[in-house]
Amino acid sequence: MEHAQEHEACLEQTQKYYVERPIYNQELLQGQLRRRERTSQTLRQKIAHSCRCSSKKAKSHLYSFLPILKWLPRYPVKEYLLGDIISGISTGVMQLPQGLAYSLLAAVPPVFGLYSSFYPVFLYTFFGTSKHISIGTFAVISMMVGGVAVRQVPDEVMSAGYNSTNVTESLEYYDARDTKRMQVAVTLAFLSGIIQLCLGLLRFGFVAIYLTEPLVRGFTTAAAVHVFTSQLKYLLGVKTNRYSGPLSVVYSIAAVLSKITTTNIAALIVGLTCIVLLLIGKEINLRFKEKLPVPIPMEILVVIIGTGVSAGMNLSESYGVDVVGNIPQGLRAPAVPEIQLIPALFVDAIAIAIVGFSIGVSMAKIFALKHGYTTDGNQELIALGICNSVGSFFQSFPVTCSMSRSLVQESTGGKTQIAGALSSVMVLLVIVAIGYLFEPLPQTVLAAIVMVNLKGMFKQFGDVAHFWRTSKVELAIWVVAFVASLFLGLDYGLLTAVAFAMITVIYRTQSPQYRILGAIPDTDIYCDVEEYEEVKEYPGIKIFQANASLYFANSESYTSALKKKTGVDPRVILAARRKAQKRHAREIKAANALRKKAVLKLTNDVEASVKHEIANEELPVNGKFASADASVQDVSPDEHEHFVEPKTNIHSLILDFTPVNFVDSVGAKALKSIIKEYKEVGVCVFIASCSGPVMNELTRLNFFDNTVTRELLFHSIHDAVLACQVRRVCFTD
């Protein structure tokens, strides 16, 4: 017991360390270290090594490409199967109504939403690395697809060839429009899938990092507004055209308001009732999450009730309520996408591919971190690419991870990708067997489902207050992403947001924070002198730090900040010296002229006085006269130099390179210029804490020569400070 108490008391004491070593600059340090020998490979050798195949390597690549081969043989049936079955059923119950609802966003018939909820989900089981995300239709991606489809096949163009009021021709118009829009959606799926697949094979999974969290959240919030406004016409039961592109939100709201007097009261009542039921169900699921074995499947219940009420009351015929309509029974034969549409859709496909991947991989990382496993970003790209490209041959539109379904799949006990496979099987049963039963389902019910599922995205408006407190730059990214995506459309808005995010990175590196460092007394720890009272500067030594790399964009501001923070501007001092030299030279010249004039006058006076004055008159001594000395004095070169010497008490300047990650040629030239300029005014410049990669870059840029050697670089700030003090003492002595 006593030993334990002594141990605790010992730990409570402040730990100290003492190290006695030489003052290391890079020249001395490199001289005492031996580099490891590295054999560099030629490009041919690298290619040959990468193409070399062995059974172990082939097996590793196969397991990487088909993760199911790795986890399925080890699947613990007794522990995982029940949870996966419950989770699969719960997710499938959500998958069905969301597939029908999000097809409206994609501007395609509802059955294609079912296809998109089956093929990609089933394929992800084999190729995906996340155990919990639910692949399938998603509001944001569906909205982006719908915007492209409407832009390529607008209502105005299609209606030009169908002016008749004949019902048959009207049906033909809708069939022709939906067919063309479906071709656009399928081609988008194929193209975005190919892009994702290529990026994954080329190991370009890092592209998602350019979609930062504030950008994605601002973008998805704007997408939620787009989705909400697009569903208003279905909720109200009014007939309006669908708009895409810049200001589409404004046009959609204006179109709905212009037709507000034609609102279908029956559709509005059914839609509002469904919204209330769904909100109550979600609130119950949230409040009693711990007590309920599985969430109440309110969405499928609303679909069943809505279908039953519509069929029983004949809402379509009696009240003119728009319904889902024909749902073909069974699966369609595979078909090749319309290749000729690829040039017109390429840019949109890139945006859909990157947004879909970024949403999927972010959710995958969240669940992987929570449950203690890893996901492969490149393999996720490959998996999504296969899901979209292969699914396009079976008439599915682009898909990604659904946030709401993924949360349900995880919270209901899902352990592996088996849960996703079971949910796709449930959708398959509906497609093959009972899909026709949902034909009387009112579209306003699907609109209600979509609107209620936007609740989580609308909560992201709270990000404004959060980012206001934490980071104004991230707030700017969120606001720009939201405003641009809202008014310019999701495609141009995304490009604008990414460009702005890149500009903020350049801004932050171009305008970093600059600090003067000082030491905490009796330590080798250096902090900002303006932030802590205890921190003191060493006399005659300035330590300058910038929290950014040194390159073309900030080299000029780095130099300006250095002069401002240290209070020593070599150019100003040299200019003052030259000005003082010229002024003093003029004074000397004037003084010498005055002296000569005085001497000449005195000589003449003396010669005249010799003739008339007595012999004991005062004569000049050693050729100098008191009157001349009193008025004019010679100035020696030493006095002249002292007169123009700059009044600075700084003898050493240390540049802390700890935050510097790289230096380019412009930065190296600026650094060399700084060393040269300060040397001219008697200030020696040293560099501290320069990393190995930065040292190598400086060497490649021919930074070091006879005047700038590695002796100016020190391993740490403290080494540089001690060297400055020793050098100053030796110089003084």
Image (tube, rainbow, N blue to C red):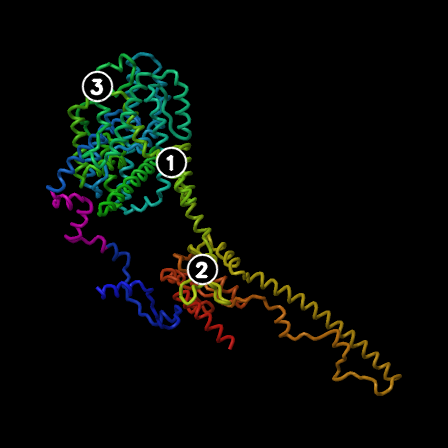
Q: Earlier in the sequence, mark 3 or mark 2?
A: 3
Q: Secondary structure beneath disc 2? A: helix
Given the current orientation, which residue lies at the most extreme left position? 78
558 or 398, nearer to the observer: 558
Q: Position of residue 54 (x, y in %)?
A: 16, 53
Query: What's the amino acid at mark 3?
Result: Gly
Q: Which residue is labeled 3 in the image?
A: 308
Which portion, as a residue range, is magenta? 48-76
Mark 2 neighbour density, 10 Å: few (under 14) some (14–19) many (20 or more): many
Q: Secondary structure beneath disc 3? A: helix
Q: Secondary structure beneath disc 1? A: helix
Q: Quick check: can you spot residue 669?
A: no
Mark 3 neighbour density, 10 Å: few (under 14) some (14–19) many (20 or more): some
Please say if 653 is above or below 610. Answer: above
Does 294 sit left or right of 42 as displayed?
left
Please say if 671 is above or below 433. Answer: below
Q: Position of residue 174 (x, y in %)?
A: 30, 20
Q: Earlier in the sequence, mark 3 or mark 1?
A: 3
Query: What's the amino acid at mark 1?
Result: Phe
Q: Earlier in the sequence, mark 2 or mark 1?
A: 1
Q: Are marks 3 and 2 in contact (CB under 8 Å)?
A: no
Q: Which residue is labeled 2 in the image?
A: 668
User: Which of the labelled discs sits on residue 461, or is there none?
Assistant: 1
Q: Are marks 3 and 1 in contact (CB under 8 Å)?
A: no
Please say if 672 is above or below 730. Answer: above
Mark 1 neighbour density, 10 Å: few (under 14) some (14–19) many (20 or more): some
What's the CA distance linking mark 3 and mark 2? 76 Å
The N terminus lies in which quarter of the figure?
A: bottom left
Q: Nearer the viewer, mark 2 or mark 1?
A: 1
Query: What's the amino acid at mark 2?
Result: Ala
70 or 165, nearer to the observer: 70
